[in-house]
Amino acid sequence: MQNLRLASWNLHIWTDYCIFAFKLEPPAMLHEEVVGRIRAILLDGEIPPGARIPERELCDRLQISRTPLREALKVLAAEGLVQLLPHRGSRAAKLTDKDMRDLFEVCQGLEALAGELACERISDAEIDAIAAAHTDMVRHYREGDLIQYYRGNRAIHEAIVAAAGNPALTGLYASVTARIRRARYVTPMTPQRWAFAVKEHEAILNALQRRDGAGLSHILRAHLRHKREEVLQAGFAETEASDLALRIA
């Protein structure tokens, strides 16, 4: 009889547990995922620079409450993507020409260092992968597909930084490039400038294949300097950024 009562009691507990388990709501979105989703929205230009962050709409879209949203906005403010306004919400950050110059200078230094380190540490397989990505990028250039060209271009630069094998460098690079991504990878190019950029990328690949760290560092610095001047000469104003970004979203 005692065993029967014990079995009945265990069955009762198991039944309650199953009912409770089935009532559980889906797990909330992780903090890192919330930050990543909002970062992508900003970088893709869905919220124009200078525009207020629509908190209620984002909460509905991401199915989160205001608290995780605001915690994510604090992280993005530290990255320079969001401007927090005391008692007035927040805005998508705007970059001035000086901001653009400063950030490109930092990016030049980071990519130059990454190039040196990559030539010391990169594997043959990684070089082959970058060479294949370069071939695809050139194909997009010949087809006149600027959107896919820019995507391939960005992948090559990121692969070189990753090949440096330095997580601290990779983290700094990601933080800086996030702020200039719209300008760097959506600015329209003249046919002459586009052809020149492709030649620069051929030189980048050749230096990498030779494992010429000093040479690759020099080429990357010049490549980024040319891009910076191109962006500034194009008058890349943040009011235009969202329109440009939508072309590659």
Image: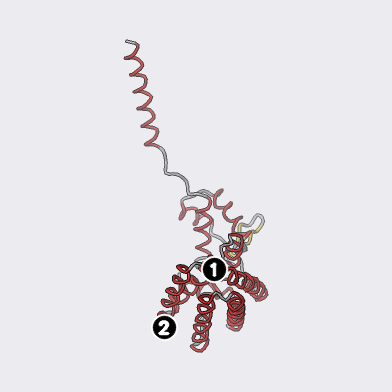
Give whichever of 90, 102 is nearer the camera: 102
Percent x, y for residue 33?
A: 50, 53
Residue 39 sits above or below residue 99 on the image = above
Choose mark 1 or mark 2, whichever is in front: 2
For the question of whether residue 236 can be seen, the reply is no
Residue lying at 53% horizontally and 59% vertically, measured from the top left: 54
Residue 248 sits above or below residue 21 on the image = below
Q: For the C terminus, give its image quadrant.
A: bottom left
Q: Secondary structure at mark 2?
A: loop
Residue lying at 50% horizontally and 49% vertically, measured from the top left: 30
Distance from the alpha carbon under mark 1 to that under mark 2: 27 Å
Give whichever of 13, 166 is nearer the camera: 166
Q: Secondary structure at mark 1?
A: loop
For the question of whether residue 238 can be seen, the reply is yes
Comes first in the chain, label 1 or label 2: 1
Please state which amino acid type lies under the numbered disc 2: Gly
Q: Which residue in the rendered view is the most extreme toward the bottom?
A: 192
Residue lying at 45% horizontally and 44% vertically, measured from the top left: 27
Percent x, y for residue 169?
A: 61, 63
Please state which amino acid type lies under the numbered disc 1: Pro
Residue lying at 44% horizontally and 73% vertically, measured from the top left: 133
Q: Which residue is mark 2?
A: 144
Give whichever of 128, 202 is nearer the camera: 128
Q: How is the image coloured?
A: secondary structure
Give whichever of 51, 67 is nearer the camera: 67
Q: Which mark is residue 149?
A: none
Q: Which residue is mark 1?
A: 48
- Side (left or right) of 40 relative to 88: left
